[in-house]
Image (tube, rainbow, N blue to C red):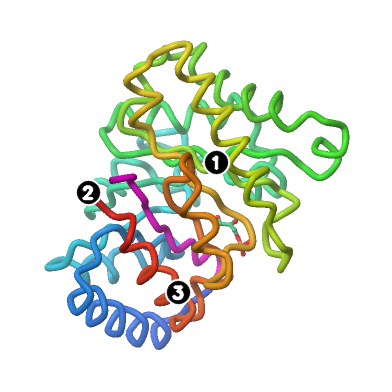
């Protein structure tokens, strides 16, 4: 069966009350519905609290960011060693909100990717084009270059046990209607490029979609052959909507 992974990216949202309520409901529903493909990416400050709450469940936890250094004089940063120390399994790398708001370029993203891999956590590499790039027909080129930067530096094997999330910048945080076939085409393109390097990795790699995902479009997205799940922003903050998304995704979990 096709793999599908659902990640809730809460971004800069949530508080203690929200978390207690959400996680209690999530644990209940996950057990009741036997769902095993959900990952929560809360703000860094709540990671440990959530990990403790989820310790007897199959829900995994993801960091939204990490520093390029392991330790030292880097005020305000969090290292992958620290994430590992508290039980984090996944790390988002290269989210467009970090590329844009924090000037993270391909070199910084590669360094983050590298340190995450070297410490045996799973990177979720976010890629995607801006509206102007799309308008100028550059979608495939931009996506390929963002992945290829890392492949060139570290070799194709680095994509083993890693996740790619195609998140077109123009679709993030909006409520736009999605052209599923167009998204499927890009996913297929990404897979076909990886195929040229390594057939096995291209077959096994999880390629998620993110941007304006809701309970209304989840079905059309997940039935596409090359979409292995979704990275959900806004809709993951509303528990009832997120529940509909994960319940539907159960049809595609391994
Ligand atoms: P939205 O689901 O709010 O569009 O955000 C997508 C996203 O950026 C997930 O990482």
Residue that numbered label 3 is attached to: 242
Mark 3 surroundings: few (<14), some (14-19) or many (≥20) residues within 10 A: many
In the rendered image, which quarter is residue 193 located in? top right
Query: Looking at the image, which residue is at 58% across and 46% down?
Result: 95
Q: Secondary structure at mark 3?
A: helix
Query: Dot 2 surroundings within 10 Å: few (below 14), some, or many (20 or more)?
Result: few
The segment highlighted magenta reads 1-12
Disc 2, SS: helix
Foreground pick, 86 / 168: 168
Q: Quadrant of residue 184?
A: top right
Q: How many marks?
A: 3
Q: In the rendered view, does 220 fall on the left or right side of 44? A: right
* Residue beneath disc 2: 85
Q: Nearer the viewer, mark 3 or mark 2?
A: 3
The numbered dot on residue 126 is 1
Above-or-below relation of 119 to 36: above
Q: Is residue 244 located in the magenta-colored stretch of the structure?
A: no
Evaluate if marks 3 and 2 touch, with contact meaning CB atoms under 8 Å apart. Answer: no
Report the Cα–Cα distance between label 3 and label 1: 21 Å
Residue closest to the eye, 29 or 192: 192
| Alpha carbon separation for disc pair 3 and 2 | 29 Å
Q: Earlier in the sequence, mark 3 or mark 1?
A: 1
Task: Please name the residue shown 64% across and 22% down the image.
Answer: 145
């Amino acid at each position: 069966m096709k793999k599908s992974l659902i990640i809730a990216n809460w971004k800069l949202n949530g508080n203690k009350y929200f978390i207690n309520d959400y996680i209690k409901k999530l644990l209940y529903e996950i057990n009741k519905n036997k769902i095993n493909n959900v990952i929560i990416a809360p703000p860094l400050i709540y990671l440990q609290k959530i990990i403790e709450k989820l310790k007897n469940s199959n829900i995994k936890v993801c960091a939204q960011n990490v520093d390029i250094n392991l330790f030292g004089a880097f005020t305000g940063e969090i290292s992958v060693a620290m994430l590992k120390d508290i039980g984090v399994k996944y790390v988002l790398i290269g989210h467009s909100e970090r590329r844009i708001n924090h000037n993270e370029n391909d070199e910084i993203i590669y360094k983050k990717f590298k340190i995450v891999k070297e410490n045996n956590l799973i990177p979720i590499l976010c890629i995607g084009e801006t509206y102007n790039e799309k308008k100028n027909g550059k979608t495939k080129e931009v996506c390929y270059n963002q992945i290829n930067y890392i492949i060139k530096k570290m070799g194709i094997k680095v994509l083993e046990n890693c996740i790619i999330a195609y998140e077109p910048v123009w679709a993030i945080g909006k409520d736009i209607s999605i052209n599923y076939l167009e998204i499927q085409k890009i996913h297929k393109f990404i897979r076909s490029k990886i195929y040229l390097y390594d057939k096995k990795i291209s077959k096994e790699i999880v390629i998620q979609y993110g941007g304006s995902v809701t309970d209304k479009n989840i079905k059309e997205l997940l039935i596409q052959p090359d979409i292995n799940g979704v990275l959900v922003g806004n809709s993951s903050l509303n528990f009832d909507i997120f529940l509909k998304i994960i319940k539907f995704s159960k049809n595609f979990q391994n």
